[in-house]
């Protein structure tokens, strides 16, 4: 056994960016072109791969093949074999000739023979390692499979260590936010709660804690906005930061919910921390700075000025005159402000923005 490779597997537990190199080395052991490592749940797949197959995996992820390849993953999971498997372990020859993933995706790309294994993670995801061989090379031989099986215990322990470390990092992140007075939790792409802090756990008037690590907001309108924000988190490139008001039960003062996506290198393959949900209070009515309004709700500068002007009591005509624009332009900005803040009426915008508190303010019980 290659001890250097074993060491790199465990090093990848601490530095996930090293996994593509591990996939390269495993692929060389199987005389394969490249390898893919991905963690899958019913709603999302997080992945990394060897550089030479990254383009193919990106196409697999963006062209609908994740859904069409569900049967192949399901077969691997049903077998639950603690080792690597090749096509003949999973399919009959007839089934392989009609499987769309092989016939329509892999073989047209010069691939078509794989050796794969699946492992369960403590996050509830399933971790797959798949090494892809050129079709002309033929199926992966048993001697190569045996060599990979020798490494599988190390791969399983490395993956488990990485998942636990990322869960711990999520916990530390939520507790760090508590230290600066922010109730917060960390969620995965499917909305599952990965970590919380005591401040948000105490906001039972605003948050419902549900089974299977789920949560919702007691304010139905705000909960719909939260659900909409979570559905965009699978898109690592364009998921926006969303902020909206949430009303509390029993006449509690409203608060602001911020759903902040975790992007790029900060999103780990093994846990898929997708966003931080932070709640900030609404306090004594006042006209907030334009910069605060703009940053909280992702408003344009013009929209933020219109919103703040409403809070200080100006009419649409006065706002139009101040900005040397038409009333219709102000109305357009106003519609955008209501959409982004989750309000239905101008009065709700005034009530919401007129009570924004600085971050150091106390939180409602």
Image (spheres, rainbow, N blue to C red):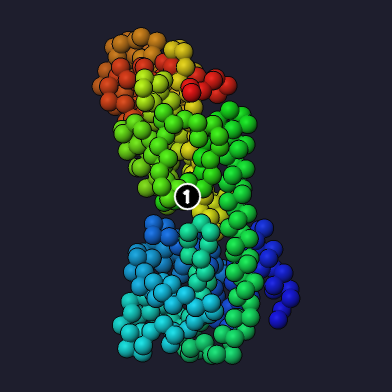
State the residue lying farthest toward the front.
211
Residue 48 seen from this side? yes
Q: Where does the N terminus fall, quadrant-wise? A: bottom right
> Which residue is found at the position 32% from the left and 20% from the top?
348
State the residue lying farthest toward the right.
3
> Which residue is found at the position 46% from the left and 34% from the top?
258
Residue 220 picture location, percent across and down: 31, 34
Q: Nearer the viewer, residue 83 or 6?
A: 83
Report the side of 47 relative to 155 (left or right): left
Q: Secondary structure at mark 1?
A: strand
Toward which corner of the image does residue 21 lie, by quadrant? bottom right
Compared to residue 262, the image places residue 243 above or below, namely: above
> Which residue is found at the position 55% from the left and 19% from the top?
361
Compared to residue 124, the image places residue 208 above or below, namely: above
Which residue is tagged 1?
A: 188
Report the side of 54 relative to 333 (left or right): right
Toward which corner of the image does residue 332 lie, by quadrant? top left
Residue 99 picture location, percent across and down: 33, 79
Q: Residues within 10 Å of mark 1 (few under 14, many from 20)?
A: many
User: How many numbered marks appear?
Assistant: 1
Report the side of 342 relative to 185 (left or right): left
Q: Nearer the viewer, residue 2 or 150?
A: 150
Residue 299 picture location, percent across and down: 41, 29
Q: Nearer the viewer, residue 86 or 349?
A: 86
Report the side of 25 relative to 91 (left or right): right
Q: Nearer the viewer, residue 254 or 140?
A: 254
> Which residue is found at the position 38% from the left and 65% from the top?
66
Residue 98 picture location, percent across and down: 31, 82
Residue 324 seen from this side? no
């Amino acid at each position: 056994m290659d001890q250097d490779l074993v060491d790199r597997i465990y090093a990848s537990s601490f530095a996930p960016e090293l996994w593509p190199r591990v996939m390269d080395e495993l692929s060389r052991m199987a005389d394969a072109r490249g390898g893919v490592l991905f963690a899958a749940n019913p709603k999302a797949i997080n992945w990394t791969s060897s550089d030479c197959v990254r383009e193919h995996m990106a196409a697999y992820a963006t062209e609908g093949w994740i859904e069409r390849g569900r049967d192949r993953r399901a077969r691997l999971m049903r077998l639950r074999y603690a080792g690597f498997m090749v096509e003949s372990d999973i399919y009959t020859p007839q089934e392989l000739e009609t499987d769309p993933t092989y016939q329509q995706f892999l073989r047209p790309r010069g691939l078509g023979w794989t050796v794969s294994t699946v492992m369960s993670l403590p996050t509830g995801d399933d971790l797959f390692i798949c090494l892809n061989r050129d079709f002309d090379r033929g199926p992966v031989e048993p001697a190569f499979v045996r060599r990979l099986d020798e490494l599988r215990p190390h791969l399983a322990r490395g993956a488990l260590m990485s998942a636990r470390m990322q869960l711990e990092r999520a916990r530390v992140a939520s507790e760090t936010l508590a230290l600066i007075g922010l109730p917060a939790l960390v969620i995965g792409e499917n909305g599952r709660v990965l970590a919380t802090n005591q401040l948000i756990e105490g906001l039972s008037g605003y948050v419902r804690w549900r089974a299977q690590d789920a949560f919702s907001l007691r304010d139905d309108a705000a909960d719909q906005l939260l659900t909409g924000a979570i559905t965009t988190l699978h898109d690592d490139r364009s998921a926006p930061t969303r902020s909206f008001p949430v009303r509390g039960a029993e006449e509690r003062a409203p608060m602001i919910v911020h759903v902040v996506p975790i992007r790029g290198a900060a999103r780990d393959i093994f846990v898929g921390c997708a966003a931080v949900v932070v709640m900030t209070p609404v306090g004594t009515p006042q006209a907030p700075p334009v910069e605060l309004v703009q940053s909280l709700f992702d408003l344009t500068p013009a929209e933020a000025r219109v919103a703040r002007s409403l809070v200080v009591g100006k009419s649409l005509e006065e706002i139009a005159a101040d900005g040397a624009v038409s009333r219709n332009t102000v109305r357009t900005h106003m519609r955008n402000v209501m959409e982004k803040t989750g309000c239905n009426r101008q009065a709700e915008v005034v009530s919401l923005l007129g009570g924004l508190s600085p971050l150091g303010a106390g939180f409602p019980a």
